[in-house]
Image (tube, grey):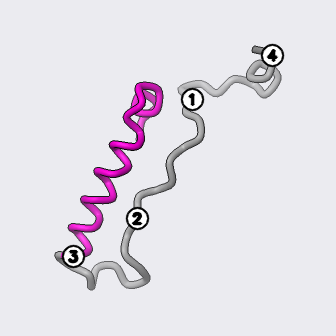
Amino acid sequence: MTPADVHHGRAETVHADRARILDAAYAATPERFVRHPPRPPALPTAAWINKPADSEATAH
């Protein structure tokens, strides 16, 4: 997921698309996933290109 996806509000859509694709991959070849069905990573709470120092982030 890119910072642009999060910034422009596409994160949930991208996450759902990834989940659907991973479900299809698991349905087609479950033997490839030995521990559990695959899941997309959790949605990020924030996205940065260049994360500011903690003092800068709280100053605004």
Q: Residue at x 34, y 42 (%)?
A: 13
Q: Residue at x 17, y 75 (%)?
A: 28
Q: Earlier in the sequence, mark 2 or mark 4?
A: 2
Q: Which residue is mark 2?
A: 39
Picture coordinates of residue 16, whole percent (x, y): 34, 51
For the magenta stretch, what is the residue range? 1-27
Q: Earlier in the sequence, mark 3 or mark 4?
A: 3
Q: Which residue is mark 3?
A: 27
Q: CA distance from mark 1 to mark 3?
A: 35 Å
Q: In terms of depth relative to the viewer, which is nearer, 14 or 54? A: 14
Q: Secondary structure at mark 3?
A: helix
Q: Main secondary structure of the magenta part?
A: helix
Disc 2 marks a residue whose amino acid type is: Arg
Residue 5, compared with residue 45, is above or below; it is: above
Q: Residues within 10 Å of mark 4 (few under 14, many from 20)?
A: few
Toward the top, the furthest residue is 60
Q: CA distance from mark 2 to mark 4?
A: 36 Å
Marks 1 & 3, CB-CB < 8 Å contact: no
Picture coordinates of residue 29, whole percent (x, y): 20, 79
Q: CA distance from mark 4 to mark 1?
A: 16 Å
Q: Which residue is mark 4?
A: 59
Q: Which residue is mark 1?
A: 48
Q: CA distance from mark 2 to mark 3?
A: 13 Å
Q: CA distance from mark 1 to mark 2?
A: 23 Å
Residue 46, compared with residue 33, is above or below; it is: above
Residue 40, compared with residue 58, is above or below; it is: below
